[in-house]
Amino acid sequence: MSRVRIAVQIHPQQGSYGAIHDALKEAEELGVDIAYNWDHFYPLYGDPDGRHFEAWTMLGAWAEQTERIEIGPLVTCNSYRNPQLLADMARTVDHISDGRLIFGIGSGWFERDYNEYGYEFGTAVSRLRDLGSALPLIEQRWEKLNPAPTRKIPVLIGGGGEKVTLRLTARHADVWHFFPKDPEAMAHKMAILDGWCEKEGRSPGAIERSAGVHPHLLDKGLAEADEYVDLGVRQFTLGVGGPEFDLGSVPRWLEWRDRTNERLAG
């Protein structure tokens, strides 16, 4: 049975890059398994015109600035880059990091990014259709690149759309990420994903389940976090926002991770 992992999503907004860098280094030193950013051009909360940094440029820096922790976007917006170029960018960061990239991708949703940067927003249906067309192209480009990726780059798909997103997840993803309101919501989506896996001829166990949870969830006790584990969730992502990028809740999560993995192994 796969082990539980703890990730932090360092929101690249409302702070200096120096503060982001320091949070990344602290996360690695504490023993966090994965550090994510996100792929937007403007803040998602707080001052709408506050500081914000671009995702993939940052990931190239993160690859150089770390040694052990896995890194990735949670998630790349498929609309913002040609899929062939995106595959090459990911392969390059994979090499810079010596095989520590997780390739998170989704169909996009933040309309201001599209309008300000001149992308066609379209509809939720058209964006999902574009994602479905892009994923095979990305996979095919990885097979053609020289040098090849250092490993089979893990693909993470984020979202909970039951008709299209979860079917694409069953077809292409190694990791599925969702922001559930509670374990019951997670269980419902997981059952839908399992159904799509059966239709696509994949084992549900081939896809790691990842939940975005509030950093202070453990303050309410361990029951809810343990319930996610019992459902099969193996990755827990904590959001960390600027300008402070406070990781104060992380050590408790890491202690819980280690105890949980001992329980699962025993």
Image (spheres, rainbow, N blue to C red):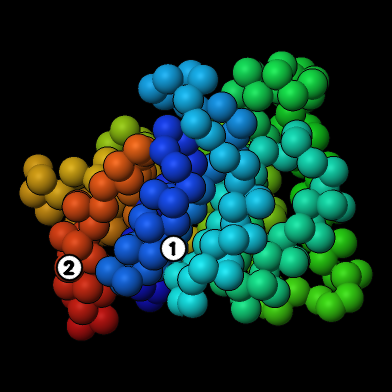
Q: Quadrant of residue 132?
A: top right
Q: Is residue 157 above or below residue 181?
A: below
Asked if residue 123 can be seen in this view, the reply is: no
Q: Is residue 31 above or below residue 46?
A: below
Q: Residue 118 location in percent, x, y?
A: 79, 21
In this image, 87 relative to 110: left or right? Answer: right
* Residue receiving disc 2: 255
Q: How many marks?
A: 2
Q: Residue 32 location in percent, x, y?
A: 34, 66
Q: Is residue 71 above or below residue 182?
A: below
The structure residue drawn at horizontal position 70% and vertical position 19%, both measured from the top left corner, is 116
Q: Amino acid at mark 1?
A: Ile
Q: Residue 8 location in percent, x, y?
A: 38, 53
Asked if residue 218 can be seen in this view, the reply is: yes
Q: Residue 208 location in percent, x, y?
A: 48, 61
Q: Quadrant of residue 120?
A: top right
* Residue receiving disc 1: 34
| Mark 2 touches mark 1? (CB < 8 Å) | no
In this image, 21 relative to 151: left or right? Answer: left
Circle 1 — which element?
strand
The structure residue drawn at horizontal position 10% and vertical position 45%, both measured from the top left corner, is 219
Q: Amino acid at mark 2?
A: Glu
Within 10 Å of disc 1 (Cα), the crowding (few <14, some 14-19, many 20+) is many
Near-viewer residue (96 or 178): 96
Q: CA distance from mark 2 to mark 1?
A: 16 Å
